Structure formats: structure tokens, C-alpha cells
Amino acid sequence: MGRVAALGERARVAGLALAGAVVLVADDPEAARRGWRNLPDDIDLVILTPAAAEALDQGPATPVGRRRLAVVMPP
């Protein structure tokens, strides 16, 4: 079974580490895209902040051959 990651601004994702999520802080769009590209292979679910989700829609984000479920936090 894969793990869960949270990607986005520090203030919105930091607390998810207490629930066992891998936290990837991304305070700007490029950091969000870099964080997505560098997710560990065993991550199956990614919780995105709205800003991170928007950043991923604006650039190449998904590595070929790897699919993950992504959900976006409410604003």
C-alpha cells in the first residue's frame, strides 16, 4: 500500500505530517512543480493546496508512466 503526501504552502500542509503524510513544502509555483516531479515512487495519494494545484495545471508535472490520485483542499 502506498503512502500519502501533501504538497503546498507550509502553513496549509505542515500539520498533515502529524497524520503520517509526507509533507512537501511549495511556497511558489516552481517549487510545486518540482515537488510533484520528485515525489517518492510509493506515494499513491497527493493532497494539494489550491495554489499547488493551479501551479501543476500551468506546467509539465506528471512523469510519464506514473499515475497518482490527487485531491485539492478547499480554499
Image (cartoon, grey):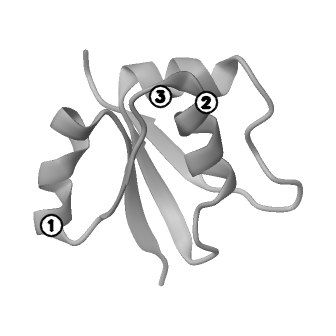
Amino acid found under the numbered disc labelled 1? Ala
Quarter of the image for residue 68 reads bottom right
Residue position marked by numbered label 2 in the rendering: 30
Mark 1, Cα crowd under 10 Å, few <14 / some 14-19 / many 20+, is: few
* Circle nearer the N terminus (2, 3): 2
Residue 52's label in the rendered image is 3
Q: Position of residue 37 (x, y in %)?
A: 69, 52
The answer to which of marks 1 and 2 sits earlier in the sequence is 1
- Residue at image location 39% in from the left, 21% down from the top: 50
For image coordinates 73% across by 39% down, the residue present is: 61
Q: CA distance from mark 1 to mark 2?
A: 26 Å
Q: Which residue is mark 1?
A: 19
Give, as a three-letter code, the residue at label 3.
Answer: Ala
Q: Nearer the viewer, residue 67 or 6?
A: 6
Above or below 49: residue 18 = below
Q: Position of residue 60 (x, y in %)?
A: 80, 32
Quadrant of residue 58 within the rendered picture = top right
Q: Residues within 10 Å of mark 3 (few under 14, many from 20)?
A: many
Label 2 Cα neighbours within 10 Å, binned few <14 / some 14-19 / many ≥20: some
Rendered location of residue 14, percent (x, y): 18, 50
Which residue lies at the image location 89% right of the left edge and 54% below the top edge? Answer: 64
